[in-house]
Amino acid sequence: MSIAFNFQIENKIMAEKLNDFASRLSKGTPKGLGLGVKLLAGVSAAAYGLYRSMYTVEGGHRAIIFNRIGGVDQNIINAEGLHFRFDSIVHLKK
């Protein structure tokens, strides 16, 4: 057998597998797939929100909290370490 003939056979097999996959996919998705996608989206959104709410103040530094509405809050000065902020209006100034 020649290399070109083997290549044609492999292409034909791959095309059959792709057509088989496409026909199974067009019949509909599995019953739990919609719930799985929703759960994955929810967990991803929660993880992103947690990631965006954390900030670190490096050693030897202090951080003040700046609120877009009220300005700088002189009563809250964060020392070094890991901190959390829960409001999108609040910004950190190092």
Image (tube, rainbow, N blue to C red):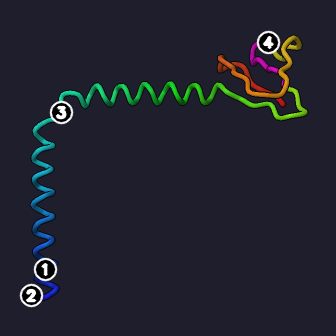
Q: Which residues are magenta?
A: 63-70
Instruction: From the image, state whether disc 4 or disc 3 is nearer to you.
Output: 3
- Where residue 17 appears, as percent x and y from the top left, is 13, 58
Is 6 placed above or below 79 here? below
Q: Tag 1: residue type?
A: Asn
Instruction: From the image, state whether disc 2 or disc 3 is nearer to you.
Output: 2
Residue position marked by numbered label 4 in the rendering: 70
Quadrant housing residue 64: top right
Q: Tag 2: residue type?
A: Met
Secondary structure, magenta segment, majority class:
strand
- Element assignment for label 3: loop
Q: Earlier in the sequence, mark 1 or mark 2?
A: 2
Instruction: Examine the structure image and report whether residue 71 is included in the region drawn in magenta.
Output: no
At horizontal 85% and vertical 23% (from top left) the residue drawn is 79
Q: Quadrant of the C terminus?
A: top right
Quadrant housing residue 91: top right
- Where residue 35 appears, as percent x and y from the top left, is 29, 25
